[in-house]
Image (spheres, helix red, strand yellow):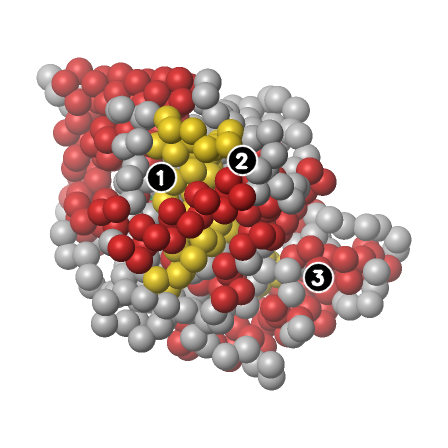
Amino acid sequence: MEIIERSAAQIAREVNARSLSARDVTEAVLARIDAVEGEIGSYVSVLHEHARAAAARVDERVDAGESLPLAGVPLAVKDNMCLVGTRTTAGSKMLEHWRAPYTATAVQRLLDAGCVPVGKANMDEFAMGSSCENSALGVTRNPYDLTRVPGGSSGGSAAAVAAFEAAIGMGSDTGGSIREPAAFCNLVGFKPTYGRISRYGLIAFASSLDQIGPLTRTVEDAALAYDVMAGKDPMDATSIDRAVEPTATHLRTDLSGMKVGLVKQFGTSELGGEIDAVYRKAYQDLQALGAELVEVELPTADYGLATYYLIAPAECSSNLARFDGVRYGMRVDGADVHDMYEKTRAAGFGPEVKRRILIGTYALSSGYYDAYYVRAQKARTLIARDFERAFAQCDLIACPAASSPAFQFNAKSDPYSMYLMDYYTIPMSLAGLPALSVPCGWTTPAGADRPMPLGLQLTAPLFKERDVLAAAHAYEQKTQHAAAHKPAIATVGA
Ligand code: GLN
């Protein structure tokens, strides 16, 4: 198998055994990036020199006898995460030329474990979107069909891993931004429990929801990356001080003794006949692996979107107030300081970001605060309680990861149709739960000439990351859906 196609686990094994050098892996991946970026556009910045220097350090450490869990593994870093000295744009004109003064904790932990950062990945501006089309810094295409979006907001990280331009992609998920692009690009995408991974150095969108996690080609790789990133960080007061159970050493090959809940409110028949059949088969396969299927109810899940689209914009309006032309990034001069603020924010933010700031500011304004924001917080509590009740009857919940397969560019012209993509992922985000998308089959959209992947979402109670990854691994090993089709973009020299 070509170096670029190997999993993170394989690469680390070989680099630790010194049968392959981090340098060779890095050169192979940089060559791949140079060959395909013109068509895919995963990266906002490719870090040739940075990567070579990091690879040399990994090789030195391995030569000195160290064993590193992710030795030599090429890493795509979403461009809302800081890597010292590199441009960190969050997909926005506002930060187009901004350089990070320090490194995010999650990124640092992966680097310490042996990862080699090869590029900063494209994303929807400030992580608002589901297709990467809201990036101000370029187009990213889906490696499985170049006429389609890679999903979002972590679309660059997803495209990079799917097109063999990295083995691990870092994503951030506020309402689905890891799980949806994973589903669209035939990957595993894992959002841990809120607070499990430090947000220090992650440019904030909605602080009570934002969570970092990995996008990978295998469940084992997601577990390895999670194990390295998880844990308390004194630099993030919301990171949780609770022992992290290692997951990569506890992957399973069956689901005996596990109860899997199917949500009554999340029927799949309206997703279309072929897609419905894929999910029904997925649930049968969980049963064939030994799981007992039970029906559970999430009666308030339907309020998820409305709740999220008050809480997330409210938090975003407050978080993005810092981009005022004084402290970070872009400044457009004006007649006085207020004129400068206005001109800077008018020029620096794109339309979706402005829409969210307006909605959020309105929802937080006096007179409307109780009617909108406080009510949304109450609805959020009800949704979390629904999950608690459901988890009294099961260990995991299975449902779709996205409302459709990857769609074509410019297909979602009104914001609401874009928001609907996250119908299945937002309730878990509001409840802070660990959730993962794993490839579960393929569908050929009307008029398309290539099949597109679909994702099965598995959700567990708070802190049960191990159960999610263990079950996803069993399912992946039995079904092997990811291997059924190759990306539309050839592997160099394969
Ligand atoms: N698509 C959702 C939004 O636009 C979720 C984005 C995310 O998880 N960052 O807000």
Q: Determine the secondary structure under disc 3.
A: helix
Instruction: Decide which of tag 1 and tag 3 comes sooner along the chain.
Output: 3
Disc 2 versus disc 1: nearer the observer: 2
Report, in whole angstroms, how far the alpha carbon at label 1 lies from the one at label 3.
31 Å
In the drawing, what numbered circle is on residue 425? 1
Location of mark 2 (residue): 291
Foreground residue among 268 and 453: 268
- Looking at the rendered image, the quarter that the N terminus falls into is bottom right
User: How packed is label 1: few (under 14 Cα within 10 Å), some, or many (20 or more)?
Assistant: many
Q: Amino acid at mark 3?
A: Ile
Residue 494 in the figure: left or right of residue 69:
left
Left/right of residue 60 with respect to residue 365 in the rendered view:
right
How far apart, in angstroms, are the residues tagged by discs 2 and 1? Answer: 22 Å
Name the spot of residue 257 as percent of width and height, x first.
60, 29
Marks 3/2: CA–CA distance: 32 Å
Q: Does residue 191 appear in the picture of this structure?
A: no
Residue at disc 2, CB closer than 8 Å to ligand 1: no
The amino acid on which the numbered mark 1 sits, given as a three-letter code, is: Thr
On the image, the x and y values in percent for residue 144 come to 41, 69
Among the two numbered marks 3 and 2 on one chain, the one whose residue lies closer to the N terminus: 3
Q: Quadrant of residue 488?
A: bottom left
In the displayed orientation, state which residue is furthest to the left: 367
Residue nearer the viewer, 100 or 483: 483
Residue identified by numbered label 3 = 11
Q: Is residue 339 visible?
A: yes
